Image (cartoon, rainbow, N blue to C red):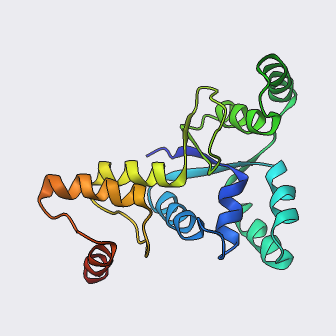
């Protein structure tokens, strides 16, 4: 079976690397889900310098990069993507960095781009936040196909929808967590 290409924005990688960030656990659950479910993770080359600059633990970042080099696609923008991103950014007053990432994802056949940006440019690739992507997978799977200790409201709402269809809705986060731990 051919892998499905999914592009991760730099903020997802930073969330993975920095345990104190609010989306760290969700980003970790996302990574586990992607790895275990036939997805090919794609990032752009320029993210390496961005992540290295932002994350304080430099040795950890370098070891992470060493690990992903043989497992993820780390792709360049290329002259055509850069020119198209500049033109589109000028024409529509868009954020060049976001346009570059989105066009790079499109150029590399990604079915989705996952970011925690509140507003991201639409270039024809499905854009998701981590919570949106995982919520969709909960609905497809009919339950929580990954381990997450404290699910967001969006993930809880997706679980509620699934569980109401099964007749097993949890009234509180604590009930859901307790049930997840026992299964």
Q: Total of numbered circles in the picture?
A: 0
Q: Horizontal placement of 86 versus 150: left or right?
A: right
Q: Horizontal placement of 35 versus 101: left or right?
A: left
> Does 85 appear above or below 59?
above
Taking depth in this image into account, of 42 and 127 the one nearest to the observer is 127
Residue 77 appears in the picture as rendered: no
- In the image, what residue occupies the spot 72% across and 69% down? 67
Q: Residue furthest left?
A: 167
Q: Residue furthest front?
A: 171
Taking depth in this image into account, of 122 and 3 the one nearest to the observer is 122
- Estimate the x, y position of residue 72 in percent, counting from the top left: 66, 55
- In the image, what residue occupies the spot 19% across and 63% down? 169
Residue 68 appears in the picture as rendered: yes
- In the image, what residue occupies the spot 88% across and 63% down? 53
- In the image, what residue occupies the spot 25% across and 77% down? 179
Q: Residue furthest top?
A: 91
- Estimate the x, y position of residue 32 in percent, counting from the top left: 50, 66
Q: Quadrant of residue 12?
A: bottom right
- Estimate the x, y position of residue 82 in percent, counting from the top left: 85, 29
> Does 8 appear above or below 86?
below
> Does 169 appear above or below 7?
below
- Estimate the x, y position of residue 93 in percent, counting from the top left: 80, 24
Q: Quadrant of the C terminus?
A: bottom left
């Amino acid at each position: 079976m051919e892998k499905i290409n999914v592009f991760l924005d730099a903020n997802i990688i930073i969330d993975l690397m920095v345990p104190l960030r609010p989306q760290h656990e969700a980003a970790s659950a996302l990574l586990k889900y992607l790895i275990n479910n036939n997805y090919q993770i794609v990032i752009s080359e320029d993210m390496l310098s961005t992540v290295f600059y932002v994350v304080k633990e430099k040795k950890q970042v370098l070891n992470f990069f060493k690990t992903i080099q043989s497992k993820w696609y780390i792709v360049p923008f290329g002259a055509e993507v850069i020119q198209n991103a500049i033109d589109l950014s000028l024409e529509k007053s868009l954020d060049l960095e976001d346009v570059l990432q989105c066009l790079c994802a499109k150029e590399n056949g990604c079915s989705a781009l996952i970011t925690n940006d509140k507003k991201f440019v639409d270039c024809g690739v499905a854009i998701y936040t981590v919570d949106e992507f995982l919520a969709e997978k909960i609905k497809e799977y009919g339950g929580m196909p990954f381990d997450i200790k404290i699910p967001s409201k969006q993930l809880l709402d997706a679980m509620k929808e699934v569980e109401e269809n099964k007749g097993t809705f949890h009234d509180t986060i604590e009930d859901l967590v307790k049930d997840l731990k026992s299964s």
